[in-house]
Amino acid sequence: MAKQLPYPIVREMFERFQASEPEPKGELNHTNAYTLLVAVALSAQATDKGVNKATEALFQKVATPQDMLDLGEAALIEHIKTIGLYRNKAKNVMKMARILVDDYGGVVPNSRAALNALPGVGRKTANVVLNMWWQFPAQAVDTHIFRVGNRSGVAPGKTVDHVERAIEDNVPADFQLHAHHWLILHGRYICVARKPKCGACIIRDLCAFEEKTQ
């Protein structure tokens, strides 16, 4: 784990990310806050590409929690059975739909506590939805961000919570909104787990990672 980089270096990194991709976007397909919530919940231990393939037909039928209840668990399973842990995820999605209809009038709440209380929704999922739909500068730390944060020195930490706090504390405020997308995409395509593509990295000269590749 690298040491925390000083503010000027972190700022320069995010200036480069912004110059390269001014408006980074999440890669999960969705049509509204509810389908985004479902897609993110389904993405746990699955790839965005796999989730998008499974939800393509699903989201043509389902746009609201009531639509999901009308569809039913068995039909939902048929749509998502290519995704890991699909049976448990289907149960949680149905329970979540029922709560949203009964307690929230079918509307997805936009407080972290309310989202966290939904079945199958943890802090990371809540943060993704808050960030992508409501443009709240929440930091959803996944394996990519955890790796990049620690390798680079942008946001080192021993746990996901530590890295989340390090991003909030050390990334300049004007980059907070898009920080998690820049870091996710960097980890997904450049700073990959086994052999990072340091030769193609736009922050190579600033990064604290000692075992750089060519």
Image (cartoon, rainbow, N blue to C red):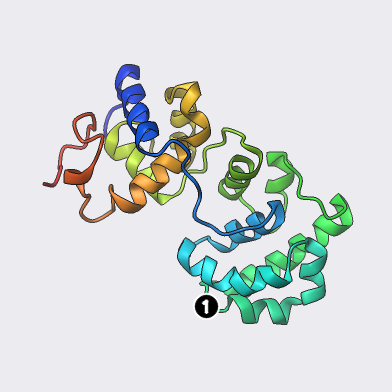
Q: Nearer the viewer, residue 133 or 108?
A: 133
In this rendering, position of residue 95 left or right of residue 160: right
**Which image quadrant is residue 147 in?**
top left
Q: Nearer the viewer, residue 209 or 172?
A: 172
Q: Residue drawn 18% across and 31% down?
A: 205
Q: Position of residue 60 (x, y in %)?
A: 68, 70
Pointer 1: what residue?
Answer: 82
Q: Position of residue 81 (x, y in %)?
A: 57, 79
In this rendering, position of residue 47 left or right of residue 69: left
Q: Amino acid at mark 1?
A: Thr
Q: Nearer the viewer, residue 197 or 140?
A: 197
Q: Position of residue 179 (x, y in %)?
A: 46, 35
In this rendering, position of residue 123 left or right of residue 19: right
Is any atom of residue 159 visible in this view?
no
**Which image quadrant is residue 127 in?**
top right
Secondary structure of the residue carrying tag 1 is: loop
Location of the N terminus by quadrant is: top left
Q: Residue drawn 32% across and 38% down?
A: 150
142 lies above or below 179:
below
Q: Position of residue 119 (x, y in %)?
A: 70, 58
